[in-house]
Image (tube, helix red, strand yellow):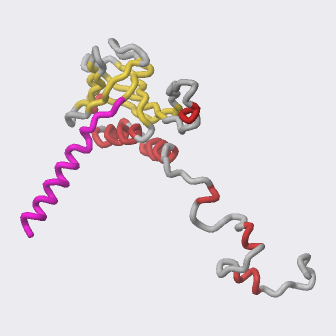
Amino acid sequence: MRISSFAVLAVFAAGLALADSSPQTATYVDGNVAGVAPKTGGTLLFAGDQTMNFRTGLATVPVPYANISHAELGAVVETSKSHPFYKVWEMRKHKPQNQYLIVNFANEEGEQKTMTLELDQSAAPEVLGIIQNHNAKAVDPAKAQLAASSSSKSAKPDIMRAGPASSGWWGDDVWKTTRNADKWNATPSANSPNQR
């Protein structure tokens, strides 16, 4: 029993240790970082507890967590993958969406830098959460919560949300069910317009 619980605990601890270290593919969109041109693809690496690195083919930009002064999620954008014209079935498929992540930080020399990264929409809130875990003052919790809820893929239209309906369901006027029994069992008044 002790050996199996120890094994489960070790696997769980290893999973937590690797959770922060998964690299994310990103595109440098805009900013004032030297050595990186706009629209440059790269990888965000979370190897240590001190620094997050944005690695491109030619440069590596270290971003110390302690030096991040502000981080927030930006707009959601659709990426357009070009498909050959004759593949009509590919044109109607859902286009992948990406989200901007804006990070303001000071580099090793103390210069203020800004970096706007384009990440997969599901990965952007995760990266913001990693930044918040390492430097809570850099992320405004209200904005992070609002951005995370607005970028949620499970957002449902108002009609699909659980809870009491504001105006009722149109079927309540047509079918007698246990849900609307109080409406059907009520005796109509003398001035009721629906008398038959």
The quadrant of the image that shows the C terminus is: bottom right
Q: Main SS of the magenta segment?
A: helix
Q: Which region is colored magenta?
A: 1-25
**Image side of residue 98 versus residue 92, left or right:** left
- Residue occupying image coordinates x 43% and y 18%: 39
- In the orientation shown, which residue stands out farthest toward the left? 3
Q: Residue at x 28, y 14 (%)?
A: 58
Q: Is residue 24 magenta?
A: yes
Instruction: Please indicate whether residue 135 sits to the left or right of residue 14 in the image.
Output: right
Q: Note whether 58 is above or below 76 in the view shown.
A: above
The picture places residue 131, in percent across and down from the top left corner, at 32, 37
Above or below — where is 111 with respect to 179?
Answer: above
Residue pictured at 28% horizontal, 23% vertical: 55
In this view, 189 is above or below 61: below
- Above or below residue 17? Residue 84 is above
Spot occupied by residue 6 in the image (x, y as percentages of width and height) = 10, 61
Which of the 4 image quadrants contains residue 93? top right
